[in-house]
Amino acid sequence: MKMSVLRMLTSLTSLGVGFLPAVCNANALDPQLDCQSSPHDFIAPLLDQQSIDSKPMRIEANSVNAFRPTSGSNLTAFGFHVYSVFGYEQNDPLFIQGSGQPVKSSTYGVVVTGSAVSVEASVRKAGSSAVVHEVIPFFLTAVFCDGR
């Protein structure tokens, strides 16, 4: 019996060590989500670093462009895994215009995997003024900055 517990602990430790490099190499976007940047200044470096796909995965009618993180980019925001990155700035060739009326002010942010309550707590603890909005209850939450 003691031997099987020891084997289980050894296996779990091995698995944990295997995940360690992924956590250590995470690219945290917290500083950029202080709402002091422009959408261009937020998205352009991610494109240059190839952290997000260059072609938006979705362009909303209001021209907000959503980009998928590239494989292995390990983007995080406030301790949560980034599901997508989005933004729009009028008259900026970095963003493709949608079929409808563009948003009046610029916007940028991320969609993370996590509940709105826990994401909100982490965002406020970090001192960010970003808006937190539930996308899918208990699963996906948007963190975004408007204006500027």
Image: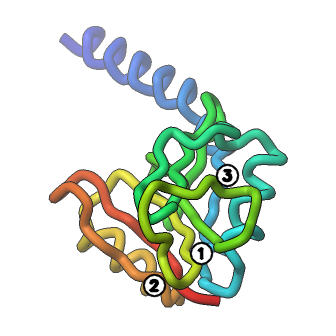
Q: Is residue 25 above or below residue 96?
A: above
Between label 3 and label 2, give the one nearer the viewer: 3
Residue 3 is labelled as: none
Q: Position of residue 43 (x, y in %)?
A: 70, 59
Residue drawn 54% across and 84% down? 105
Q: Mark 2 = which residue?
A: 125
Q: Quadrant of the N terminus?
A: top left
In the displayed structure image, the side of residue 112 where residue 20 appears, left or right: right
Q: Is residue 98 above or below residue 4?
A: below
| Cα–Cα span, label 2 and label 1 | 13 Å
Q: Mark 1 = which residue?
A: 33
Q: Position of residue 21 (x, y in %)?
A: 65, 34
Q: Mark 3 = which residue?
A: 27
In terms of depth relative to the viewer, which is nearer, 111 or 16?
A: 111
Q: Is residue 26 above or below residue 112?
A: above
Q: Secondary structure at mark 1?
A: helix
Q: Is residue 97 visible?
A: yes
| Cα–Cα span, label 3 and label 2 | 19 Å
Q: Secondary structure at mark 3?
A: strand
Q: Are marks 1 and 3 in contact (CB under 8 Å)?
A: no
Q: Earlier in the sequence, mark 1 or mark 3?
A: 3
